[in-house]
Image: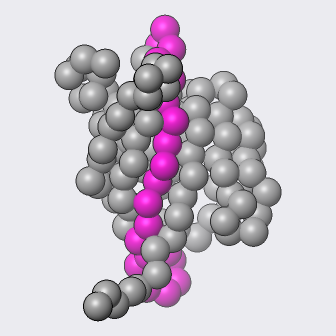
Amino acid sequence: MTPDDAMMINKLLADYGHVVDDHDWDRAHEVFAEDFVFEMGDSGRPDLHGIADIVATFKGRNMYAHVTTNVSITEDDDGTVRAHSKFIGFPNEGPPVTGDYHDELVKTPAGWRLRRRRGELRQRKFFD
């Protein structure tokens, strides 16, 4: 992975927020791989598979904005590229939420795309 790859992955993670928050579904193919899976098991909802499933599910969502930050990119021995990042979400109702994204990315002829994403909401914790 080159420095340009890392820069383009950071751009991809930013573009996710712009596409989803703005409901700019004509650009969804710029963010998601054809075989994309959003793992939703932690939320008690079924996983989402592919762009059509993302669009159908997110059209009625109640999150008007979110920010992705603290991006850490790694490459496994087998060449799998992963990103771990933090997010802050702003729902239409209620306080902001924060959490972690765990992503698997793939480089396609058209550029980097999200192949898998798992989001985890963080709960407020106090440490000893």
Q: Residue furthest right?
A: 46
Q: Is residue 76 visible?
A: yes
Residue extent of the magenta highlight: 89-110
Task: Count up the numbered dots.
Answer: 0
Query: Does residue 99 show up magenta in the picture?
Result: yes
Q: Is residue 42 left or right of residue 64?
A: right
Q: Where is the C terminus found, in terms of image quarters?
A: bottom left
The vertical placement of 28 against 85, above or below, is above
Chief secondary structure of the magenta portion: strand
Q: Where is the N terminus found, in terms of image quarters?
A: top left
From the viewer's side, name the closer residue of 48 and 80.
Answer: 80
Q: Residue furthest left?
A: 3
Where is residue 83 shown, x and y percent of the image?
Answer: 40, 41
Q: Residue furthest top?
A: 109
From the viewer's side, name the closer residue of 4 and 57.
Answer: 4
Residue sitting at 53 percent across and 64 percent down?
Answer: 120
Residue sitting at 44 percent across and 23 percent down?
Answer: 77
Q: Is residue 92 left or right of residue 42?
A: left
Give the colouring mode of the picture.
one colour
Where is residue 34 shown, x and y percent of the image?
Answer: 66, 25
Q: Is residue 96 left or right of residue 92?
A: left
The vertical placement of 102 against 27, above or below, is below
Where is residue 90 shown, x and y percent of the image?
Answer: 43, 72
Residue sitting at 66 percent across and 65 percent down?
Answer: 42
Residue sitting at 46 percent across and 74 percent down?
Answer: 122
Where is residue 93 shown, x and y percent of the image?
Answer: 52, 84
Q: Is residue 19 visible?
A: no
